[in-house]
Amino acid sequence: MDMKLFQVDAFTNAPFAGNPAAVCILSEKQDEQWMQQVAREMNLSETAFLLKQPDGFSLRWFTPATEVNLCGHATLASAHVLWEAGLLSITEQAQFDTRSGLLTAKRHGDLIELDFPALNEEPAEAPAELIAALRVTPRYVGKFGTKYLIEVNDEETVRKLDPDFSALRKLPGRGIVVTSATSATPFDFVSRYFAPWVGVDEDPVTGSAHCCLGPYWGRRLGKQEMKAYQASARGGVVNIRLGVERVYLGGNAVTVFSGTLHA
């Protein structure tokens, strides 16, 4: 049965920047193997699958290699598609049933704002082999779930990072975010995100990482609202508001193409 398929650049207001995600509007429930094959075919960091339910939409996210529990940019892309395709009115809130519970998205000024769970890191000691593969000298190392947060001294270090991905793949891991404060307005901090273990060497803009980066930098900077820049080759902007156990991630999205999936 034919299904609508979109490619959307998220956390940007211009095409060919931000983080591209595929969004597939399912006409009926599909099995995991099929969704994984579609994600592998799209070969983007994430492919989102939406299925209409009485109280919203079920939402699942797949990298080319595996299903993941939380993805910010593909959720933002999904909300954008629902409004753009007329499946929700522009004033309606998007509600998603996911592996991470109920997630919502709404219009907040000229941004799409996601309501996500806050993730707090705990101080940790990263394996020496992992730090060597990243080729950095950490100022602080924390861990949230199975992922590492590594703060370094300055923005230049973040931007010039050149990890040894072959070495990283040989180590156990899930994801690493490397970050620093910045004095360059209008941004409060910068980051980059690496996940070779799930088939994504570097993710262009990682909404879910900002669920941890937001509270982390909020405490250090004494701010409840921040603007972040993910300094990948494509680059992307994430606006952050901190709530009680929640993080509100704001960004723009642009549809690059839409079509029909015949598979």
Image: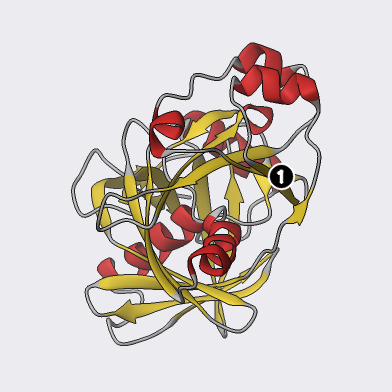
Task: Mark yes or no: residue 25 visible.
Answer: no
Q: Could you classify mark 1 by the number of other residues whose Cα lies within 10 Å: few (under 14), some (14-19), or many (20 or more)?
A: some
Q: Position of residue 132 (x, y in %)?
A: 68, 18
Task: Say which residue label 1 marks.
Answer: 147
* Amino acid found under the numbered disc labelled 1: Lys
Query: Is 184 positioned to the left or the right of 133 in the image?
Result: left
Question: Against 167, is 58 above or below?
Answer: below
Task: Mark yes or no: residue 196 visible.
Answer: yes
Query: Is 203 positioned to the left or the right of 136 in the image?
Result: left
The quarter holding residue 18 reads top left
Q: Position of residue 209 (x, y in %)?
A: 56, 52
The quarter holding residue 59 reads bottom right
Q: How many marks?
A: 1
Question: Against 193, is 244 above or below?
Answer: below
The quarter holding residue 58 reads bottom right
Q: Nearer the viewer, residue 113 or 66?
A: 113
Q: Nearer the viewer, residue 54 or 17?
A: 17
Q: Nearer the viewer, residue 231 or 201?
A: 231
x 61%, y 84%: residue: 244
Q: Position of residue 102 (x, y in %)?
A: 63, 76
Residue with the most extreme left position: 14
x 38%, y 31%: residue: 156
Q: Position of residue 73 (x, y in %)?
A: 45, 54
Q: How is the image coloured?
A: secondary structure
Question: Against 123, is 250 above or below?
Answer: below
Element type at mark 1: strand
